[in-house]
Image (spheres, rainbow, N blue to C red):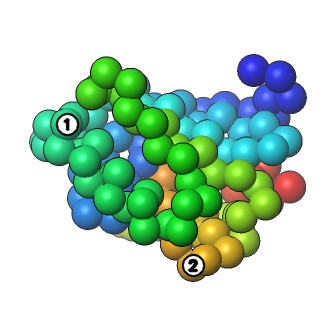
Amino acid sequence: MADTLGSWIINYLPDDGGRLTGKLILTVDEVRFRAMYDSSFKTVAKNIGLAAGTLAASGGAVTFLREDGSEAEIVLPRSVIATAEPAKKGMMKQVVVTLTDGSRFVFEYGMLSVKKIVAAING
C-alpha cells in the first residue's frame, strides 16, 4: 500500500461487544482496519453484523465492507478523525479514535504500548 506510515496487528472492539483481530494500517489519507478473524467467543457473522450497525451509526464517514461473510474492513478518513487517545482497561492498552461526529472506535493492543500508534494517527 502506497504511503503506508505504519501497520500493527491489533484488536477492534465493536460497541456492542466482541473482538475482531486484524491489521491496522495507517496511510497519509486514512486509518484502515482489516479484520482477519474473530477472536471473541461470538461467531464471525454475528460480530460483523454488530460492527455493521456500529459503523452505520457513524454518519457515513466510515466504510464497512463485507466480502465473503468472514471479512470486515473499517476505513476512517483522516479528515473525519478528531483525535486518537491512549486508554487502559485493566492491563490492556487501547487506542480510542474519536471522529468529528463524536463516534468512537476502540482498538486494543494487549499489554503493549500504544504511544506510537496514537502519535501516528494524530501525526
Image height of 36 relative to 30, above or below = above
Image coordinates of residue 14 in percent, x first then y, are 35, 56
Query: Where, by quadrant of the figure, is residue 66 drawn?
Result: top left
41 to the left or right of 82: left
**Gap in Å between the C-alphas at discs 2 and 1?**
27 Å
Image height of 34 relative to 11, above or below = above
Image coordinates of residue 86 in percent, x first then y, are 61, 65
Image coordinates of residue 7 in percent, x first then y, are 66, 31
Residue drawn 79% across the image and 60% down it: 79
94 to the left or right of 71: right
Q: Amino acid at mark 2?
A: Gly
Residue drawn 60% across the image and 45% down it: 75
Q: Amino acid at mark 1?
A: Ala
Instruction: Decide which of tag 2 and tag 1 comes sooner along the chain.
Output: 1
Q: Nearer the viewer, residue 19 or 82?
A: 82
Give the SS element for disc 1: helix
48 to the left or right of 97: left
Asked whether residue 85 is in view, the answer is no
Report the quarter where the C terminus lies: bottom right
119 to the left or right of 97: right
Residue drawn 71% across the image and 52% down it: 77
Q: Which residue is mark 1?
A: 45
Q: Which residue is mark 2?
A: 102
